[in-house]
Image (cartoon, coloured by chain):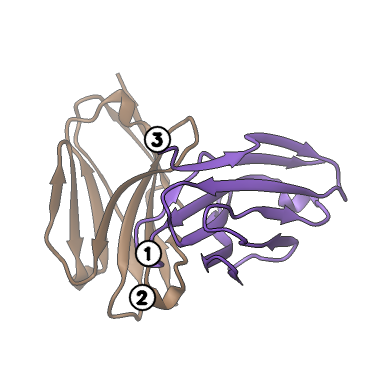
Chain colours: A brown, B purple
Amino acid sequence: AQKVTQAQTEISVVEKEDVTLDCVYETRDTTYYLFWYKQPPSGELVFLIRRNSFDEQNEISGRYSWNFQKSTSSFNFTITASQVVDSAVYFCALGGYNQGGKLIFGQGTELSVKP
Amino acid sequence: NAGVTQTPKFQVLKTGQSMTLQCAQDMNHEYMSWYRQDPGMGLRLIHYSVGAGITDQGEVPNGYNVSRSTTEDFPLRLLSAAPSQTSVYFCASSYGITDTQYFGPGTRLTVL
């Protein structure tokens, strides 16, 4: 079965703290894709990153970084020096050719960054 | 590029009414899909299309109908609205089924 688990329902940090959002997935596919989306209070879904299963290289984009580990089926997302504008719900999602394009979303982690 | 657009942004219906949620994209994407977002349930796939004239059911298709007569448009029809269809509806598109899906701004639907 395909499944994405985001065990952290809510996280609250103070501005400038680093924060890591956890994502654990389950799949029997050998080729799959992992995504992170951000949903700010305004409600839209904003794409952050896409990672192929055969590319375990970690990625950094400004204050954002992602750690993909196939051995533990995890794709964690770290925000360095968090800012109030990072407050949002963050979704991890799993997709693949065998899913017909269907994205399987985790339940989301609500991040609150306080000034 | 406008990206993925959805109309209306908000809608209130009475039980039994029908309506169509509009979705359009100007990125020449072949793949389009509809999701609904409910509290505690995450996002779930309703219907999808891999190209004009081709549609298929997702995880929660009951009560919804789709068609894809053009590459750009993928409307979602509620045949007879029920309170259980109160949700936020997102349309998404991508070049192919494994490419990044870009979402529209969403439609918040309330069925009384």
The image quadrant of residue A114 is top left
Residue topped by disc 3? A88
Q: Quadrant of the C terminus of chain A?
A: top left
Query: Which residue lies at the image location 17% right of the left edge and 30% below the top edge?
Result: A81
**For the residue labelled by badge 2, is the local secondary structure a helix, a strand or a loop?**
loop
Image coords of residue A112 (percent x, y): 37, 31
The chain letter for the residue carrying disc 3 is A
Residue topped by disc 1? A94
Q: Is residue A4 above or below residue A62?
A: below
The image quadrant of residue B110 is top right
Judging depth in this view, the residue of A51 and A9 nearest the camera is A51
- What amino acid type should be assigned to the residue bearing mark 1? Leu
- What amino acid type should be assigned to the residue bearing mark 2? Thr
* Residue A59 tag number: none
Residue B8 located left or right of residue B50 = right
- Contact (Cβ within 8 Å) of mark 1 with mark 3: no
Q: Is residue B53 above or below residue A86?
A: below
Judging depth in this view, the residue of B5 and A54 nearest the camera is B5
Asked if residue B3 can be seen in this view, the reply is yes
- What amino acid type should be assigned to the residue bearing mark 3? Ala
Image coords of residue B9 (percent x, y): 62, 34
The chain letter for the residue carrying disc 2 is A
Image coords of residue A29 (percent x, y): 33, 80
Choose the circle earlier in sequence order: 3 or 2.
2
**For the residue labelled by badge 3, is the local secondary structure a helix, a strand or a loop?**
strand
Q: Nearer the viewer, mark 2 or mark 1?
A: 1
Choose the circle earlier in sequence order: 1 or 3.
3
* Residue A27 tag number: 2
The residue lying furthest to the front in this view is: B70
- Contact (Cβ within 8 Å) of mark 2 with mark 1: yes
Badge 1 and badge 3 both on one subunit: yes
Q: Is residue A87 above or below residue A10?
A: above
